[in-house]
Image (cartoon, rainbow, N blue to C red):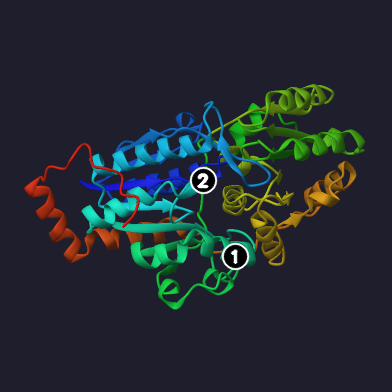
Amino acid sequence: MMRLMVYSHDAFGLGNIRRMLAICEHLLQEIPELSILLLSGSPMLQGFRLPKRLDYIKLPCVNRGETGEISAKYLGMNIEDIVRLRSHLILSAAINFQPDLFLVDKKAYGIKNELIPTVRYLHKSLPKTKLVLLLRDILDTPEKTINEWKEQGYYAAIEKYYEQLLVVGTPDVLDFRYEYKLPEKIASKVKFCGYLRRPSGYKSQETIRRELQLQSGEKFVLVTPGGGEDGYQLVETYLRGLQVSANHQNIRSLIICGPEMPKQQKQALESLACENSQVIMGEFTEDLMSYMEAADAVVSMGGYNTICEILSADKPAVIVPRIKPSQEQLMRCQRMENKAFFTTVHPDDLTPELLIQEVTNLLKNPKRHSQIDLGGLDRISNYVKNIFTSSSFVRIHQMMKSSSPTHSQSEPAIIAE
């Protein structure tokens, strides 16, 4: 059985864990002899259906505020102690799981460099273990990303430790190599995989429309701010837009607030929603695709996963991107809007009247999506298969497993070389 260890960068929202779970599930479908250990701090990890041959280690939660600063989310500990604890758990997992491949999400050294001991342990003690870095289509502005990579030593880390960089995007939206000025040795490791097509939901469109009691001629709008931690403004503006709209009687709305929306904000939105009998409020569903496929239009923020879901369902959408602390969502929306994918409303321009007008326009004249490459899951699977099936890897893997080497249960953290 081949062993894959996956690190999910989880400091805000549900985006990273949903993306990494989608990749893991596809890999398990495509590679029957694969076993996966997932490492994540997501507080919602237990809310997802997990397939056989995948298990996880739950790391203590951290949180990224609007300034981008990382702090403890729940435990009454300072961030240095939290990171040290997470780092020791990750290293222990590597020592005991002995992965053949380590797939790292977003940051070469993890949150606040918590992966350094594990990366160096694998390099020194398991030199045949391959390291692969998975990157979104867009990280942030080129200036900010380049400065961060230089300050954190990511260029040197990738050149020394990583076999490949898998970018889940396409160069026609953003050429990762050029815009982030990757040195030639690193640029040669980049593989553009395309965006991640999401599979159809568990329920049919007819079932969803019956469930929501939609009447003949009634339009269904799905509103989703992702995890919801910073989604209050979007939902509140939409609800107030319905109040001022002359056409709101023809719209039935399902609002999925997100499990990380603060309790007081959720209660305030529920009170506002009670004024409109055609508004249904929910907190979380792992089957968002079923509702998206049944919707006539979508209102959302511009997170990577949500955009992939909208593209997969081929739904007209009004996107209000997050603009801090990262410009990632705004950049994605601006570049995709130029390809006639979405209608984008900048948060600084957001008003109830404007938002509901844009929704009404889409319902009257749906904007369909241009062709975009959604073959990311298959390409990731092929790259992983190629690593596992390389003749040298198979030979070494078989020798190592057959000899069953004993490793130290008290392997020290390797901080410096």
Name the residue at 52% across, 29% down. 77
Location of residue 238 with respect to 163 vertically, above or below: above
Q: Position of residue 245 (x, y in %)?
A: 90, 38
Looking at the rendered structure, the kind of residue marked 1 is Gln
Mark 1 and mark 2 lie on one chain; the one further toward the N terminus is 2
Disc number at residue 371? 1
Which residue is the extreme one toward the front?
416
Position in image of residue 310 (x %, y %): 62, 50
Tell whether 292 sits left or right of 269.
Answer: left
Q: Which residue is painted at 37% across and 35% down in the image?
A: 56
Per the image, the residue denoted by label 2 is 16
Residue 133, position as x, y percentages in the image:
41, 58
Q: Label 1 to label 2, Cα distance in Å?
A: 25 Å
Give the structural element (helix, strand or loop) at label 2. Answer: helix
Would you place residue 410 above or below residue 122 in this image? above
Callout 1 secondary element: loop
At a point 45% along the width and 50% down the height, the residue shown is 113
Q: Quadrant of the C terminus?
A: bottom left
Q: Identify which residue, 274 or 87, lies in the foreground.
A: 87
* Tag in front: 1 or 2: 2
Q: Amino acid at mark 2?
A: Asn
Is 277 placed above or below 341 here?
Answer: above
